[in-house]
Amino acid sequence: MNFVYHFVTFSILGWIIEVIYRSVNNRRLVNPGFLKGFYLPIYGFGALFILAGHTLLASCSLLIRALFYFFTLTGLEFITGAAIERVFRIRLWDYSKQQFNIGGHVCLYFAICWTLLATLLDSMLDFFISHARVFRKQFYPVSDIVLVAIAMAIPIDFSMSLRKRLKGLKFDNEATKREFFAIASPLLAHPSVVKLKDCNHHFGKTRLDHVLDVAWMAFRISKCFLLDCKATVRGALLHDLFHYDWLRGGPKWHGIRHPRLVLQNALKVTSLSDKEQDIIKKHMWPLTVIPPRYAESWAVCFSDIYCSWRDYIVPIVLSLRGKRDAWIRSASSTFPSYAALKDGYIRNKGVIIPFSEPMHSGHSLNILLIDAQPRTLPFTTFRTLTLPRVAGATPAKHRVQIIDGRMEKIKIPTHGVDLVGITFSTNNASLAYDIARNAKELGIMTVAGGTHTTAVPDEVLEHFDSVLIGEAEGGAWENLLKDAQKGLLEKRYFNEKPPDLGNLKPPRLDLLRSKQYLPAYPVEATRGCPNQCSFCFSRYIHPTYRKRPVSHVIADVARAEGANIFFMDDNLTVDKKYAKELFTALRPLNKRLYFQMQLSAAEDEELVRLAAEAGCRGVFTGLESINAASLDSVSKTFNQVEKYKEQIMILDQHGIFVVGGLIFGLDGDNRDVFRQTIGFLNKSRICSVAVNLVIPYPGTDFHSQMKAEGRLLNFDYKNYTGYRLIVSSNGMSSEELEEGYKKFIEEFYSVKNVISRFRNQRRPLRQLPMYAAVNLAYRLPRQARSRPFGSQLLKDIRRKLL
């Protein structure tokens, strides 16, 4: 009982603290949370964690207990905030404008605050508990009665609030019913499923009505919790796909055995995903012993239990009142019963068409768009606009799904997909080819797009049915979809002229489902770059430099759910007049901006000032090299090495972090370039650099030059990452280039050097976390992937020749 007392007491104290804090901030009385009572259960659970740490870790130092409180309380806050947002579609607190936040549910600043408060409470807990016991004894039994009454009121209050909130979400409207029917209709057209209407199941209810009832309830639960509604409905409709009378015949131990028999029947009707198979196999849990694996399986399992018991208990109760037959007639004629569907949605026998829903001309497609990349660690990568832009350009009659390989497993469903579109870069070509092969084995049309496809379309066509060259918007994608509706794809699709950026439709960022992206909203203001760097692929996929109307960009930024805005542009400030107009318009929105720019633009101090006033916190700029001869070899002479320090200083003085891009292995580099570069960077105000070995992207002038000179060492696309040696240098041996690159990474990103640079640049201490995080983010992938192989390749060649 002591735990109950502590829970209730601190729930009330937490409520008092929140009321005072929020009322002072809002200058009016605010009742925190969505419960009606004067308590906040999250504070009660937090107190229990503190009590556990104080008791179980009593022999540990206060620092150890503080770390325990940091992780447990942060985890509690994150889980509670995410769960409430997912179920109730509301946010009780929002840290999205704080730095180092995760989904707006937790942030570093408040995590430290809660830890300090918990540590303070830990040190005072013994004093508090002793006085609480005295108070309890003095007012016994009144104190116990009151606390127990409040403890009982909390779950009742929560249940009532939950019910009210779910009713407010309106999952019973006509649009939801149509969505449910759209998923169910293909299975409801199959004879084996329709035959269930002739099978009695529960107290006069047909088996078909039962599975529809379960599917409808599980579907609404899935929508509430943002689960896979399609898998839920399909699994629920098939979970009792058997045609014998289980009350009078059928196999022995029906309750335990029939899920596997049903699965065999279901696989004869349609192909099933792992999730759908799990729904069918586990719907009789706990009789099946092994619990469901997926949240969708739990939704169907609980829905089946509820519907089954309701169909038993309600008729029995109504029989006592003489109303059982009326209930059966009502239940069999209202949505989602088969009779109701037949009257309102099924026009002709065997042909399922939703009434009053306009039919689009042409066959609608189920489109799966895939960003073919390997998985990355959570919260280490940004959302991109590539596939959301394609989805935005897709006519509304088609259904689109996006899989981002960085965030989720790439798996093509065995059913329900008509067209697979894959975008990929050179280093991920082999992965994309494997995905395309799997899709074609399932009989699905495949189309490729992206940088590598635009560079070498003939090679890509050996693996895909069709290729989309260049940009998707502007007619190419729409023409491809028209042909896909007919089942006949051309080999190549492209735009006759670059699309007008003023006509772009909003990107479908809602299709990027993962919650593990870095908290930055992607925006696009321009496309292309007027410069002609020989190693860069941008000018091939975006042949002309174009700008969106400033008003359109501002509308995109205004839609952003967080404070961090990341511009995906290759060179946002190359048109200074446009950039100044954009920054001026962005200033009132109070956002934090990050973008790529040409370093020479920093000489325009008005532009830099406007960028800083608009909220610019950091820029990425392509330095490429501190060697003028190396820059000249790749046609980047507009970079002036002698002005680098001054230009970086101007940006830094306006509070803008500068991260540079460096390339080693260019013509003009020699063995001294690593030492010279380290010296330059350590004396400048630069925050960090992304340093790579030169990549000869297929389709670029640089690749053609290297190939003509016989300097390509490796043709395996997997190694075209920037961390591996691909091109032999004319200023040093391959062994020297590899070794110099490796030592540069170890020295520049070392803790000692990072702290030394931070101290020498005399930055305020509050910038240290960001400074360290940026350097760590650039070090880790390069340190892990820069294993030497070029020199080993040369050794193997020499050994074979000898």
Image (spheres, helix red, strand yellow):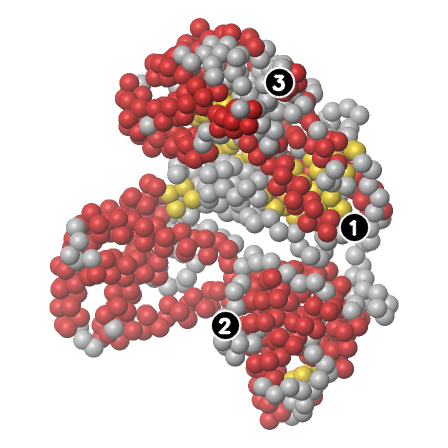
Residue occupying the point 65% across, 52% down: 412
What residue is pinned by disc 2? 290
- In this view of the protein, which residue sits in the foreground, 660 or 802? 802
- Can you see residue 9? no
- In this view of the protein, which residue sits in the foreground, 659 or 452? 452
What residue is pinned by disc 1? 364
User: Which element carries disc 3, helix, strand or loop?
Assistant: loop
Residue occupying the point 13% across, 64% down: 130
Amino acid bearing label 3: Gly
User: Which element carries disc 1, helix, strand or loop?
Assistant: loop
What residue is pinned by disc 3? 710
**Is 187 situated above or below 476?**
below
Amino acid bearing label 1: Ser
For label 3, count other residues whose C-alpha is less than 10 Å away and answer few (under 14), some (14-19) or many (20+).
few
Q: Position of residue 773 (x, y in %)?
A: 38, 33
Q: Mark 3 or mark 1, which has the lower sequence index?
A: 1
- Can you see residue 49? yes
